[in-house]
Image (cartoon, grey):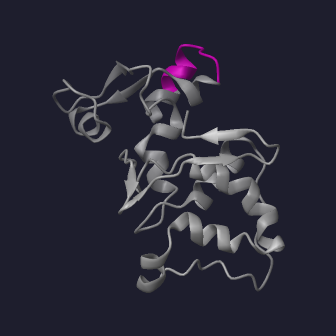
Amino acid sequence: TEMLFGAIVREDRPIVELLDSNYTFVDERLARHYGIKNIHGSHFRRVTLDPASPRRGLLGHGSMLTVTSVATRTSPVMRGKWILENLLGAPPPEPPPGVETNLGEGEEIAKITTLRQRLEAHRASPVCASCHNIMDPMGFALENYDLIGAWREKDGPAPIDSTGKLADGTPLAGPA
């Protein structure tokens, strides 16, 4: 991630390349994690990404995806909030006092519903919806990445739904 940022600054590249660069920097271990073949050795090098790669730009970096997850799962809320704060410069307000932010992390709740369903129930409250309708769609768009940034098609037995709509109605479908 630091190497991507450094290359963009050093090469005087457009700032939007932080989001859509067609290259990244990997060593063998990170390349294996990202599913990039034929990279050997512990030194980092610049690699050109396949046009269909989900690793384009900062939002495809395991470092960014890990820091926007919790210890045991992804967090669409944290990921959406990170995008608002760090990329758009528009942090959401803090939750009002007394609002329950625990989405039912207990084993029984997790068996019954997906994380998306638990967040939808949380957004049923207009107080909660006012912020979550802004944050959650951006976070859901990144749900194909697990808590450490590995690509996945399912969360347990459930297929990933990475769709949503921004507050202005713009549809989202995955990280691209």
Image x and y of residue 34, in percent: 32, 37
Q: Which residue is at the front of the view, 51 or 82?
A: 51
Magenta-highlighted residues: 6-15
What's the residue at 48%, 82% (across, down)?
109
What's the residue at 47%, 38% (across, down)?
60
Q: Which residue is at the front of the view, 123 or 34?
A: 123
Left or right: residue 35 compared with residue 50: left
Is residue 93 in view from this perspective?
no
Residue 51 among magenta residues = no
Left or right: residue 137 compared with residue 49: right
The image quadrant of residue 118 is bottom right
Task: Residue at the far left: name it.
Answer: 40
Image x and y of residue 17, in percent: 58, 23
Is residue 36 in view from this perspective?
yes
Residue 140, placed above or below residue 95: above
Residue 13 among magenta residues = yes
Locate the N terminus by quadrant. Answer: top left
Residue 166, placed above or below residue 39: below
Residue 64, placed above or below residue 100: above
Locate the C terminus by quadrant. Answer: top right
What's the residue at 57%, 21% (across, down)?
9
What's the residue at 53%, 47% (across, down)?
142
Left or right: residue 38 compared with residue 11: left
Image x and y of residue 102, in percent: 60, 80
